[in-house]
Image: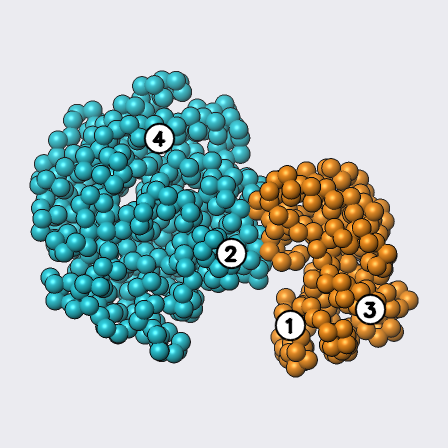
Chain colours: A orange, B cyan
């Protein structure tokens, strides 16, 4: 697999302490991307690693981690390799006697429903809902529309694989309120819920037009949180 | 200018406490000592006029060379160094000598404890152990609102912080989660005080994650509480408590003495590891152990403590629950001394193997030596990773990895600790400063603790990189108070005066930051 980097101790990629594997390559171009260097399908700093090599790295973090998170770029572009990795990590859990959950962090542009084996090996997905309105989504990511993301959200929710929904809060560029309202509607219609995490936009690492864009203020974040609470969402902020 | 609270007439050349105020007149007329400090210094000076311990010439020489150090315990011990009263029993039965009836409500309890603490002797003259504070308080808060309880606890904690002006003082929490425990953590976070030190006894099978996470969150805010491996430590002692820095000792008992072996000073006497292990180490250990036995015999047979002190006569401590702490310091430097050039304890297998060889020899000795009056320990000495004193330069605490030599990965660091912690029953610890992102995910930090404890790590403390309170070697000090002290202003806590030079000389600001 094409690996950008492996962080053996991550406190920000899902519940508990995890080893995070970042894969190289992304299929969209978010203006607020923190890791634009992972977007290209190849890069001199990425390296080709076998599933065994990645698994060996994960093994070194036992018993200090709760599991692994595969992120990117967009990790679903390497769904086949990821399936093998999850299989190997499951085997590692069994052999070491140390349970390891396997999570995916994805932009939701690729259909999970079409990767049944992967989904059976995966404990859950942390899904980015980048925008709700298609025009807003297009302007932010360069991609045509977000119908795939919405379908994925519904599919994951129905199949109890939605670990978390993430919204990067960037006033003016992201229709946070609309996203929250639609998430609440979707939860209602399906009759299931998932935690929602509001991520405060931080210019750190960002390239291009948003490089010097200010962070949303505390008041702005408080307004989003209040709305989410009014919609009775299980919301947290980071 | 520093205060010298403790005396010693053994003339160890490396010890800064030595006889600097042996002239009683200078104590009496000092402008630097507070009234209480003068009283303590005079008591020490008086004690040290006696020469009642039989200290053979060889031992005396080790003292002079700084190889053995009694940590200023004085020449004629008249109380055990660390006392761990059975506060639960006291609360149940009252204390006759202090004319205290068993308390009936929270106010009475807190007053009861304040009075009792005031009368618990120790090496520092302040109590080093305040009990399982959550368990003591829990039965008395039924029917009271959180706010009421917190108001009372706040006053109680302020009283402790301002009157026990020394952070070598410890209260314990857990392993069970209680409402009292949660409220204590809240108050602790709000007050940001150095006293008391808190430690959570943690057992993953008993302590709910949510409570442990709250403790860790508190710790990343105010460097308190530390977390102790209850599974392993309760194996050593039926009822134990954490006192002073991180000393694990039997409740209703304590430790008669803590004397320490300064390994790098001994190692400096030879370049031959074989000679060190076969000749020097056994000789120094024998001298130190005999010296400790001599102190213990004096406390038990001569001082009258166990016949006359109310804690003993009222059954709040029992003579046969006291142990002897055989302290070690500077394992890292000793191992590095014998390791091939450039190989370092903590990151190099060869240096670690030497360290383990040294530890094994010490451990075997401690398990073989017949120590008088140490029934609860099977008459054995119990090893302790002594935390260091402020005059130790270039000597790392106990068995810790020197600042700057820490392995790149926190996991390797903790694996290393586990490997060496297994030798130490009466206290060893690691201190990990965390990046502030840890605060947003205490569950992640708890995962790391769980992993470490599973491997055999026994005790860990953290603080966040942005915290005012920092853990120096085991005790807490405020960075802002250190700055005050360094700029020449007076400060309340004795331990700020100890901590300021240690923070600088041990380069603690350079401790490897853990986080993402
Ligand atoms: S999906 Fe993620 S990696 Fe891809 S461009 Fe957007 S933010 Fe960057």
Q: Which chain carries label 2?
A: B
Earlier-in-chain disc, 3 versus 1: 3
Q: Mark 1 lies on which chain?
A: A
Circle 3 residue: A150
Residues at discs 4 and 2 both on one chain:
yes
Label 1 secondary element: loop
Q: Residue B363 carries which label?
A: 4
The C terminus of chain A: image quadrant = bottom right
Give the residue displayed 51% in from the left and 49% down from the top. Answer: B450
Q: How far apart are marks 2 and 3 (CA)?
A: 40 Å
Label 2 secondary element: loop
Residue B174 or residue A179, whichever sits in front: B174
Q: Distance between the residues labelled 3 and 1?
A: 19 Å
Q: Say if disc 3 is inside 8 Å of ligand 1.
A: no
Q: Distance between the residues labelled 4 and 3?
A: 63 Å
Q: Position of residue B53 (x, y in %)?
A: 12, 34
Label 3 secondary element: helix
In the rendered structure, the answer to whether residue A236 lies left or right of residue A74 reads: left
Image quadrant of residue A187? bottom right
Label 4–label 2 contact, CB within 8 A: no
Q: Which mark is residue A234?
A: 1
Label 3–label 1 contact, CB within 8 A: no
Circle 2 residue: B465
Q: Ligand 1 is found in which quarter of the picture?
A: bottom right
In the rendered structure, the answer to whether residue A50 lies left or right of residue B513 reads: right
Give the residue displayed 47% in from the left and 55% down from the top. Answer: B463
């Amino acid at each position: 697999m094409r690996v950008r980097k492996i962080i053996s101790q991550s406190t920000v990629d899902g519940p508990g302490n995890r080893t995070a594997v970042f894969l190289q390559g992304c299929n969209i171009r978010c203006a607020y991307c923190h890791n634009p260097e992972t977007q290209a399908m190849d890069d001199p700093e990425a390296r080709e690693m076998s599933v065994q090599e990645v698994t060996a790295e994960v093994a070194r973090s036992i018993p200090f981690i709760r599991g692994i998170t595969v992120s990117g770029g967009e990790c679903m572009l390497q769904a086949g390799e990821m399936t093998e990795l999850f299989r190997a990590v499951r085997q590692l859990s069994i052999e070491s006697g140390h349970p390891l959950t396997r999570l995916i962090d994805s932009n939701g542009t690729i259909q999970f429903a079409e990767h049944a084996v992967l989904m059976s090996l995966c404990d859950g997905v942390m899904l980015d809902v980048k925008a709700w309105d298609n025009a807003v989504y297009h302007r932010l990511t360069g991609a045509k529309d977000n119908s795939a993301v919405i379908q994925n959200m519904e599919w994951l929710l129905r199949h109890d694989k939605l670990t978390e929904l993430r919204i990067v809060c960037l006033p003016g560029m992201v229709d946070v309120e609309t996203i929250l309202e639609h998430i609440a509607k979707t939860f209602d219609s399906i009759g299931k819920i998932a935690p929602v995490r509001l991520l405060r936009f931080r210019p750190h690492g960002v390239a291009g037009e948003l490089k010097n864009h200010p962070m949303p203020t505390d008041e702005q974040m408080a307004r989003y949180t209040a709305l989410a609470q009014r919609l009775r969402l299980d919301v947290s902020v980071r | 200018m520093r205060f010298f609270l403790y005396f010693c007439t053994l003339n160890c050349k490396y010890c800064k406490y030595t006889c600097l105020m042996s002239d009683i007149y200078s104590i009496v007329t000092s402008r630097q000592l507070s009234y209480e400090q003068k009283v303590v210094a005079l008591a020490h000076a008086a004690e040290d006029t006696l020469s009642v311990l039989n200290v053979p010439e060889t031992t005396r020489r080790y003292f002079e060379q700084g190889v053995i150090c009694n940590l200023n315990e004085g020449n004629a011990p008249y109380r055990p160094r660390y006392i761990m009263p059975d506060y639960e029993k006291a609360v149940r039965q009252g204390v006759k000598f202090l004319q205290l009836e068993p308390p009936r409500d929270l106010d009475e309890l807190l007053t009861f404890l304040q009075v009792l603490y005031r009368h618990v002797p120790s090496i520092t003259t302040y109590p080093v152990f305040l009990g399982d504070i959550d368990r003591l308080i829990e039965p008395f808060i039924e029917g009271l609102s959180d706010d009421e309880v917190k108001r009372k606890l706040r006053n109680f904690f302020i009283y402790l912080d301002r009157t026990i002006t020394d952070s070598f003082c410890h209260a314990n929490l857990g392993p069970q989660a209680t409402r009292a425990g949660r409220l204590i953590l809240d108050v602790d976070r709000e007050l940001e005080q150095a006293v008391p030190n808190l430690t959570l006894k943690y057992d993953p099978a008993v302590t709910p994650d949510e409570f442990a996470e709250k403790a860790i969150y508190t710790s990343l805010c105010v460097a308190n509480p530390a977390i102790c491996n209850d599974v392993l430590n309760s194996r050593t002692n039926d009822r134990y408590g954490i006192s002073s820095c991180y000393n694990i000792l039997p409740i209703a008992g304590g430790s008669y003495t803590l004397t320490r072996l300064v390994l790098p000073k001994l190692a400096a006497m030879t370049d031959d590891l074989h000679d060190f292990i076969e000749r020097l180490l056994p000789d120094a250990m024998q001298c130190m152990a005999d010296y400790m036995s001599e102190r213990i015999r004096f406390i038990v047979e001569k001082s009258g403590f166990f016949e006359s002190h109310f804690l003993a006569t009222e059954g709040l401590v029992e003579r046969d629950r006291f142990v002897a702490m055989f302290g070690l310091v500077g394992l890292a430097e000793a191992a590095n001394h014998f390791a091939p050039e450039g190989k370092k304890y903590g990151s190099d297998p060869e240096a670690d193997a030497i360290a383990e060889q040294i530890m094994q020899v010490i451990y075997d000795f401690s398990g073989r030596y017949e120590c008088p009056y140490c029934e609860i320990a099977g008459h054995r000495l119990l090893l302790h990773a002594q935390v260091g004193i402020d005059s130790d330069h270039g000597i790392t605490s106990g068995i810790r990895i020197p600042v700057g030599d820490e392995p790149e990965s926190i996991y390797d660091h903790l694996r290393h600790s586990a490997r060496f912690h297994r030798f130490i029953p009466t206290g060893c610890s690691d201190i990990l400063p965390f990046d502030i992102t840890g605060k947003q995910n205490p569950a992640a930090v708890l995962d790391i603790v769980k992993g470490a404890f599973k491997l055999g790590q026994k005790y860990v403390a953290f603080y966040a990189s942005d915290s005012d309170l920092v853990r120096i070697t085991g005790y807490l000090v405020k960075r802002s108070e250190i700055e005050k002290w360094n700029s020449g202003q007076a400060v309340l806590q004795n331990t700020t005066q100890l901590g300021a030079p240690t923070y600088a000389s041990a380069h603690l600001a350079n401790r490897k930051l853990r986080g993402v």
